[in-house]
Amino acid sequence: MDNLTHSLVGWALAETGLKHRTRKGLAACVLAANMPDIDVFFGWAPWAPLAMHRGFTHGLVGGVLLMPPLLAGLLWLLDRWQQRQSRIASDAPPMHLGWLVALCYLGALTHPLLDLQNVYAVQLMSPLSERWFHTDGLFIVSPWLLAFLGLGIWRARRKARGWPAVAALAATLGFILLNVSISRLADDALRMSSPYPAPDRVFASPGPLRFWQREVIWRQDGMIGRAQFDVIAHPTSLFDRQELVADNMADPVVKHAALATHEVRDFLAWSQMPFAAVNRQGCTAVVTFGDARFAAPEMRESFMATASVALDRKACTKL
């Protein structure tokens, strides 16, 4: 999810009354809710789980377990410095390190659980497992969640009571569960369609506003399919189903290109619905890798990797 949504979830948690449990309570909730995205600064790291976005720092058994005490320690040190500088307000709550750590854990936990909701997915068990998890419940920026959370926080601060923030969080949770259910219906509609497919991977991608609709993308036997689902208009079936298209990942030239550069290897380690386009030019093949989840023209260039490989003499002779 976008960082504004993560921040609003942390802020809403604080406005339920948790921010009064300790000094720096609001900061702990908001900063911890964004903390796992620190991995965007470590693309250079030699350790792949850390260098990959939504890897180690988003793992429940990795980053989310280890990082909150570090954030709590930094906030505690900041508070001590502010005390020495006499910059603590007289009506501020006392500092409770235990509550500060607990709020950092709570805020950090919301981050991977939110990221779990969109098709970008998240490695929840990193570094123990490289498996990607996703529920396909939300578009990466949901105006609906921004509205629920923004209204709840505004009302909570205006009334100086926590129930509007609690209601906003409850609405957020209900909206997510509703959308996860819609994605499961889309998956069922695919598997029950004729001829009955047996996909090894399915994504049901929601849109930003029309949350009742899904673009269903699946892979089966080296082929990628696409269709549309609308739980209101077509609650049990897919429509606008396209012809299956080969992903070309079994092509020997593509297999060679997949190992050609660090950029391609990293891309394929992240990609969950990879496909390749091969352009043979003389004795060289230019292989462009993409991910079927992000194949729309407006996103394609941001989710591509390219490698050039030399063809063997026999391939050149045939050309």
Image (tube, rainbow, N blue to C red):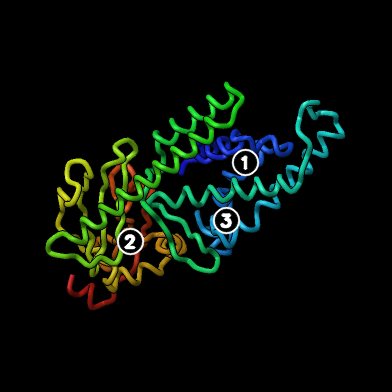
For disc 1, the marked residue is 29
- Residue at mark 2 to residue at mark 3: CA–CA distance: 24 Å
- Residue 262 picture location, percent across and down: 47, 63
* 158 versus 261 height, above or below: above
Outermost residue, top side: 158
Question: Is residue 31 or residue 194 the one in the foreground?
Answer: 194
* 319 versus 118 height, above or below: below
Cβ–Cβ under 8 Å for marks 3 and 1: no
For disc 2, the marked residue is 274
Callout in the foreground (3, 1): 1
- Residue at mark 3 to residue at mark 1: CA–CA distance: 17 Å
Outermost residue, right side: 84
Q: Which of pointers 1 and 2 lies earlier in the amino acid sequence? A: 1
Question: Is residue 307 or residue 315 the one in the foreground?
Answer: 307
Cβ–Cβ under 8 Å for marks 2 and 3: no
- Residue at mark 1 to residue at mark 2: CA–CA distance: 36 Å
Tag 3: residue type? Answer: Thr
| Side of 319 relative to 173 (left or right) | left
Tag 1: residue type? Answer: Cys
Q: Secondary structure at mark 1?
A: helix
Q: Secondary structure at mark 3?
A: helix
Question: Is residue 40 or residue 159 the one in the foreground?
Answer: 159
For disc 3, the marked residue is 57
Look at the image and tell me whether residue 281 can be seen. Answer: no
Callout in the foreground (1, 2): 1
Q: How many marks?
A: 3
Please tell me how crowded label 3 is: few (under 14), some (14-19), or many (20+) other residues with Cα within 10 Å: many
- Residue 41 picture location, percent across and down: 58, 49
